[in-house]
Structures are given as C-alpha cells and as structure tokens.
Image: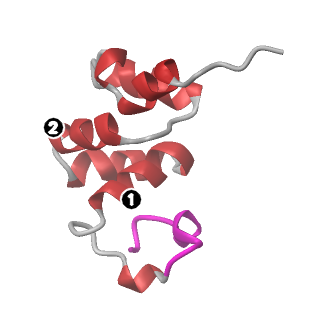
Amino acid sequence: MKPLRKELFWDIKTRSVDLDAHKQLIIERVLSLGNLEEFKFLLNHYSHEEIKRSIKSLGYLDPKTLSFVQSFFDLDKKDLKCYTGKQSARQHWI
C-alpha cells in the first residue's frame, strides 16, 4: 500500500488491503479523504469505467466530492446511488 497513506485505512490492517479485492473501499477512501497524488494513483491503477462503476454504487459522498466526480467522470447525478438515495430520503419538517 505504499502509494496510499495508511491513514486512509485507519480502521483495518493496511497489510490486508488488496488493490483488486478491496477496489471499492480504496476508491471510496481516496475520493473522500485522499490527496492529488492518491487520486492520480487511482487513475493509473484502475480504468475510468471501474472507477465510475464504484462511484455509482457508493452510498455517500460529501457534496464537494460528488460535484467533482460528477464533472470529472461526466456522470449524471441520477445514476449515482449517493444522490438518488439522498433525494428519496424522507424529509422531516419541524
């Protein structure tokens, strides 16, 4: 895991992280918490299609990250689980 900081995986043993088996987790952590070098690593290690598939299935992305990935990967918000789930969540009015 040399190209990725161990701080991204504070909750698991970094030695057990496999770049292929844990692709979803790695993509989520780098997009949410990573730096530019780690983002470049994602782009070099995974295809755009792999990253897009992972993004589409994520349950949550903060608004800034959501906006960035939507623009960078040319994604429609309606195709993103984190957006559609937020839209369908029942609002509570006080």
The answer to the question of whether label 1 and label 2 lie on touching residues, with beta carbons closer than 8 A, is: no
Whether the magenta-drawn stretch holds residue 5 is answered as yes
- Which of the 4 image quadrants contains residue 64? top right
Magenta region, main secondary structure: loop
Q: Which amino acid does label 2 sit on?
A: Glu
Q: Where does label 1 land, which residue?
A: 25
Which portion, as a residue range, is magenta?
Answer: 1-12
- Circle 2 crowding by C-alpha within 10 Å: few under 14, some 14–19, many from 20: few
Q: What residue type is labelled 1?
A: Leu
Q: In this view, does 64 lie to the left or right of 55?
A: right
Instruction: Locate residue 21, reporting x and y percent.
Output: 23, 69
Q: In this view, does 34 lie to the left or right of 91?
A: left
Residue 64: which disc? Answer: none
Q: In which quarter of the image is the N terminus?
A: bottom left
Q: Is mark 2 on a helix, strand or loop?
A: helix
Q: Where does label 2 land, which residue?
A: 49
Q: Which residue is drawn at 76% across and 14% down?
A: 93
